[in-house]
Image (cartoon, rainbow, N blue to C red):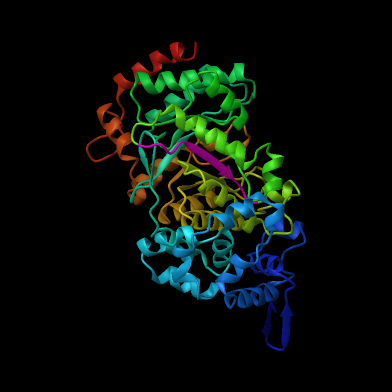
């Protein structure tokens, strides 16, 4: 399988698909750290020219990581839908790009079961940012538990009330603050500081009591390890969503202490609770470019392709939410605002192309060459691209995880500037509570605020 391209008088050869995909990737620090990146812009363009002429089927017939040694590869191959792939089977990667840009959202979505992660990653490397946005915004992916996420013209927010010591009063105060700003329809999700079941139980109980008492059409999640969540279900604790960080290789998932069989066990346990009211999508997954390299589990595959393979894992479990925490791992993998913006758009596009309800934690670490202006740009671009949800962190500064994300005010900016609304069931609840007016604008309601504040000591006792 000759992989070569000529630019002017110079010919470039690529030894295999892994090298071709890596060198076709936009520049990012993680691939350079791994020794996978193109040496210059000319080699990168040569790789893209070669990739554009590659038959799409080649990516199906020649797995990047051997079938025999990786269960994620087996999941991708065994779950491939040949019928859905048939309209694409004669295309090159470049032809696939043209097909995506010209096709309707319905046509592209129908092909999703036939599109492998490697195909999605490959075509994204040939696309400008505007291409990624133009295709993603056509693709509707709607999921349901206690509300409907991903409907056209709507964007949801995960209320993220983390606390460095899991203090119940501090968490409850952040939750109530978020609700008064009209966020929390994606979920109310806590990253716990502890992994002890005895410390986690009160978090689940407090969120469950809040949701039940005020009849809030949303779902809770405590982002502990999946084994703790299975234990919590067995102990009778009130879990809504089951969470886990996942990756695109078996070795990376092993470093997380998980396997596909463990995820199946968790999925079945969560479904057995039947806590959803409008649907049963009960899983929440998080991913991030660079995770495989940081665990030395990338098998020589570039970080964006590894990331997209993680979406095959998510797709197998019909999740409510999938979230790429795009700038969280640090500048070793995404160096600056330009790289973070590009990665966020790639991840969102690839996830939507594979049929996932993609959200993005628009974020950066304090030692990255990025700032809140970069995050404003990415947030706005993602909203234009039809992103399902983003984060709502008080002041955009997570005091437990020590990184910068998006705030409740950022969500208001999107709604007021672009007209994006909340999940319909959550919007109706805010109207009923007198926290929205008839035009969907946030309003102050002292009676509701006082009621929620009075509940704070009891909820956190």
Magenta run includes residue 111: no
Measured along the vertical axis of the image, is residue 427 above or below residue 371? above
Asked if the stretch drawn in magenta spans residue 283, the answer is yes
Foreground of the two, 265 or 190: 265
> How far across and how far down the image is residue 237, in percent?
50, 19
Q: Which residues are magenta?
A: 279-289
Q: Residue furthest left?
A: 438
- Report whether residue 280 is seen: yes
Q: Position of residue 315 (x, y in %)?
A: 51, 48
In the displayed structure, 37 sits above or below 419; it is below
Where 116 sits versus 449, above or below? below
Q: Nearer the viewer, residue 342 or 213?
A: 213
In this view, the residue farthest toward the bottom is 9
| Relative depth, front residue between 303 and 250 | 250
| Left or right, 450 with reference to 318 | left
Up the image or down, 271 lies above or below 305; here it is above
Residue at the spot x=37%, y=64% of the render? Answer: 107
Residue 369 in view: no
User: Within the image, what quadrant is residue 201 found in?
Assistant: top right
Residue 413 x %, y %? 40, 45
Q: How many marks?
A: 0
Residue that appears at 55% across and 28% down: 162
Along the horizontal axis of the image, is 124 left or right of 17? left
- Residue 405 appears at what percent x and percent y? 54, 41
Q: Dividing the image into 4 quarters, which one contains the N terminus?
A: bottom right
Instruction: Identify which residue is drawn at 71% across, 46% down.
Output: 251
């Amino acid at each position: 399988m000759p992989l070569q391209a000529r630019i002017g008088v110079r010919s470039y050869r690529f030894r295999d698909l892994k090298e071709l995909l890596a060198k076709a990737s936009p520049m990012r620090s993680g691939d350079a750290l791994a020794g996978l990146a193109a040496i210059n812009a000319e080699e990168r363009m040569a790789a893209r020219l070669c990739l554009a002429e590659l038959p799409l089927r080649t990516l199906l017939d020649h797995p990047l990581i051997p079938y025999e040694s990786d269960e994620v590869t087996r999941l991708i191959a065994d779950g491939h839908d040949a019928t859905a792939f048939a309209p694409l089977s004669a295309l090159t990667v470049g032809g696939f790009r043209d097909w995506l840009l010209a096709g309707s959202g319905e046509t592209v979505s129908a092909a999703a079961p036939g599109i492998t992660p490697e195909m999605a990653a490959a075509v994204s490397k040939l696309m400008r940012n505007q291409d990624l946005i133009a295709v993603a915004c056509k693709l509707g992916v709607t999921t349901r538990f206690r509300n409907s996420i991903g409907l056209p013209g709507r964007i949801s927010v995960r209320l993220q009330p983390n606390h460095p010591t899991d203090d119940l009063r501090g968490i409850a105060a952040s939750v109530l603050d978020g609700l008064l700003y009209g966020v929390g329809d994606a979920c109310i999700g806590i990253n716990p500081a502890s992994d002890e079941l005895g410390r986690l139980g009160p978090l689940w109980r407090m969120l469950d009591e809040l949701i039940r008492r005020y009849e809030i059409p949303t779902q809770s999640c405590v982002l502990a390890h999946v084994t703790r969540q299975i234990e919590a279900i067995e102990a009778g604790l009130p879990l809504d969503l089951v969470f886990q960080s996942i990756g695109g290789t078996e070795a990376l998932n092993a470093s997380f202490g998980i396997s596909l069989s463990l995820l199946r066990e968790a999925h079945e346990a969560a479904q057995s609770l039947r806590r959803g009211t409008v649907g049963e999508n009960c899983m929440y997954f998080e991913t991030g470019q660079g995770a495989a390299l940081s665990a030395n589990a990338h098998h020589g595959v570039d970080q964006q392709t590894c990331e997209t393979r993680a979406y095959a894992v998510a797709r197998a479990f019909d999740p409510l939410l999938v979230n790429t925490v795009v700038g969280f791992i640090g500048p070793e993998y995404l160096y600056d605002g330009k790289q973070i913006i590009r990665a966020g758009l790639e991840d969102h596009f690839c996830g939507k192309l594979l049929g996932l309800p993609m959200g993005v934690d628009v974020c950066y670490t304090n030692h990255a060459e990025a700032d809140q202006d970069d995050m404003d740009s990415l947030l706005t671009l993602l909203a234009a691209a039809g992103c399902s949800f983003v984060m709502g962190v008080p002041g955009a500064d997570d005091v437990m995880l020590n990184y910068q994300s998006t705030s409740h005010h950022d969500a208001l900016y999107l709604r007021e500037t672009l007209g994006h609304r909340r999940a319909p069931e959550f919007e109706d609840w805010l109207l009923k509570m007198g926290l929205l007016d008839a035009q969907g604008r946030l309003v102050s309601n002292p009676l509701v605020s006082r009621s929620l504040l009075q509940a704070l000591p009891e909820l956190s006792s």
